Image (cartoon, grey):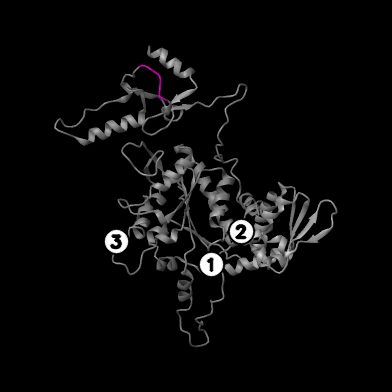
């Protein structure tokens, strides 16, 4: 009877789903059937037995029960809420293999190849790209070789700390790097981390995100990259008398992750629970990249550089570095300790580098040069309506000038373009005869209108101000 049920389940287009963790049989493995047509995977069943055994009681707790030796109830019809469709394989086609990533020393790209690929997506930041390329290359050479088994020389891990103003491309650099290497990447925010036992995410939750991005494959996750953004938000709080549960305590909790240790991580959840299966992840070969803007760190650097006497020929004026936009390049470990980072934490981040502030020339290149430049994105959008979108060089320069004034880096570019492209994206679909739109400097500065070329005559004509504004604002013209 049980064999007939098993055969019918294999022929069915549905597969069993665990009642507790909701994982299908193809992921969780063989299911155990209990009365009322409920399926439970091996991990959840054993976890339940262990939890009951730890509770104790008048009889000394529940005796050890091995779920692998338990009999299974006959197969019967399953309710629809516990069914999940199996993926049908097309005949004559092989299963799509998951990308294994670059874990072969013969195929590991050299640093100049990694930097060349980063150049296609990220503008400027040559020093940062060079440092990241070398650090990643050395890290994965360390992972791929037998580390210290033959000659006893063990290569240590080189975690990175990047410092740069907002909008300089810290997160985008890490995303592009993980895309090049085809490795799992987890991006998390340090602002939500708290000390264990308090409301918020534990430090181990960053490993849960990495495990999820690796499709719960522990081996792939142990060779991934974790980027912890806003790392400056966990600095030690100054002049406070309450417990610092989101500052220095988080830094101390992250020490074991950065150094390398075995950590129990919940599978399919971000918090530990008695009913959630756990797995062990070794962080020894996981590359940690921390990034932050570190606001007001410039003041600490200026105080250190100008703390000598301001009288005499060898003196340094107090305002000598006020006009230096890239003063973060002069940062040292002493400045970070003064900012609030503990020495043990900084010692586990040996590679420290900075990113340059975005200048006007760099913003002009950001608008036009990368593969997924913002202007190219809008040109693709209007190309779907068979309209050719063009930008004058003076218009691009005007956009960059306005972005520099906002002091939010490359993030200001999209906000500016969205502002003046609203009317164009609204008006263009109304007329099928429009073939080309040219954005001019006068339109960016709100002194004129874009240049419109029609399909029939090909003659350029300027739209009047009444035609470019929306209907709600037409009464004001």
Confirm whether residue 366 shows in the render: no
Q: Can residue 75 be found in the magenta stretch? A: yes
- Residue 268: image x %, image y %? 41, 39
Quadrant where the image shows the C terminus:
bottom right
User: Residue at label 2?
Assistant: 414
Which mark identifies residue 243?
A: 3
* Kind of element beneath mark 1: helix
- Residue 130: image x %, image y %? 59, 56
Q: Residue at x 34, y 42 (%)?
A: 272
For mark 1, does the 10 Å Cα neighbourhood hold few (<14), some (14 to 19), or many (20 or more) residues? some
The answer to whether residue 132 is above or below residue 335 is above
Secondary structure mostly seen in magenta is loop
Q: Nearer the viewer, residue 140 or 160?
A: 160
State which region is magenta: 74-79
The mark that comes first in sequence, 1 or 3, is 3
Q: Residue at x 60, y 65 (%)?
A: 358
Which mark identifies residue 217?
A: none
Q: Nearer the viewer, residue 399 or 114?
A: 399
- Residue 9: image x %, image y %? 44, 19
For mark 3, does the 10 Å Cα neighbourhood hold few (<14), some (14 to 19), or many (20 or more) residues? few
Q: Residue at x 54, y 79 (%)?
A: 320
Q: CA distance from mark 1 to mark 3?
A: 33 Å
Q: Residue at x 38, y 62 (%)?
A: 342
Which mark identifies residue 329?
A: 1
The mark that comes first in sequence, 1 or 2, is 1
Q: CA distance from mark 1 to mark 2?
A: 27 Å
């Amino acid at each position: 009877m049980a064999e007939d049920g098993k055969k019918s389940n294999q022929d069915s287009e549905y597969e069993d789903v665990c009642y507790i963790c909701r994982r299908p049989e193809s992921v969780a493995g063989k299911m155990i059937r209990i009365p009322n047509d409920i399926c439970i995977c091996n991990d959840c069943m054993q976890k339940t037995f262990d939890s009951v055994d730890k509770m104790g009681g008048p009889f000394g707790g529940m005796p050890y029960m091995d779920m692998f030796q338990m009999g299974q109830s006959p197969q019967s019809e399953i309710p629809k809420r516990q069914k999940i469709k199996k993926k049908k394989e097309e005949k004559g086609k092989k299963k799509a293999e998951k990308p294994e990533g670059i874990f072969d020393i013969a195929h590991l790209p050299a640093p100049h190849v990694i930097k060349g690929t980063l150049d296609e997506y990220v503008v400027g930041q040559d020093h940062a790209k060079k440092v990241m390329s070398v650090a990643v290359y050395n890290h994965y050479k360390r992972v791929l070789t037998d580390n210290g088994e033959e000659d006893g020389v063990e290569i240590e891990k080189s975690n990175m700390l990047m410092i740069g103003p907002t909008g300089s491309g810290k997160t985008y650099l890490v995303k592009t790097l993980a895309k090049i290497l085809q490795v799992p990447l987890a991006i998390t925010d340090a602002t939500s981390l708290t000390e264990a036992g308090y409301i918020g995410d534990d430090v181990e939750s960053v490993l849960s995100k990495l495990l999820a991005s690796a499709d719960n494959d522990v081996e792939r996750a142990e060779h991934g990259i974790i980027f912890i953004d806003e790392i400056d938000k966990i600095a030690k709080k100054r002049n406070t008398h309450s417990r610092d549960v989101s500052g220095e305590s988080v830094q101390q909790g992250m020490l074991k992750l950065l150094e390398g240790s075995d950590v129990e991580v919940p599978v399919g959840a971000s918090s530990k629970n008695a009913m959630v299966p756990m797995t062990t992840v070794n962080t020894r070969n996981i590359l940690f990249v921390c990034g932050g803007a570190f606001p007001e760190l410039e003041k600490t650097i200026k105080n250190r550089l100008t703390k000598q006497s301001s009288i005499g020929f060898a003196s340094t004026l107090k305002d000598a570095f006020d006009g230096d936009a890239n003063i973060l390049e002069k940062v040292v470990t002493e400045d970070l300790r003064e900012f609030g980072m503990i020495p043990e934490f900084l010692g586990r981040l040996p590679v420290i580098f900075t990113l340059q502030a975005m200048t006007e020339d760099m913003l002009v290149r950001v608008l036009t040069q990368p593969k997924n430049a913002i202007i190219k994105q809008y040109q693709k959008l209007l190309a779907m309506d068979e309209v050719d979108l063009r930008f004058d060089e003076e218009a691009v320069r005007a956009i960059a000038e306005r972005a520099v004034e906002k002091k939010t880096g490359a993030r200001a570019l999209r906000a500016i373009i969205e502002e003046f492209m609203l009317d164009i994206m609204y008006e263009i679909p109304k007329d099928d005869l429009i073939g080309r739109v040219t954005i001019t400097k006068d339109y960016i500065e709100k002194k004129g209108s874009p240049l419109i070329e029609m399909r029939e005559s090909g003659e350029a004509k300027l739209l009047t101000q009444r035609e470019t504004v929306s209907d709600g604002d037409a009464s004001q013209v």
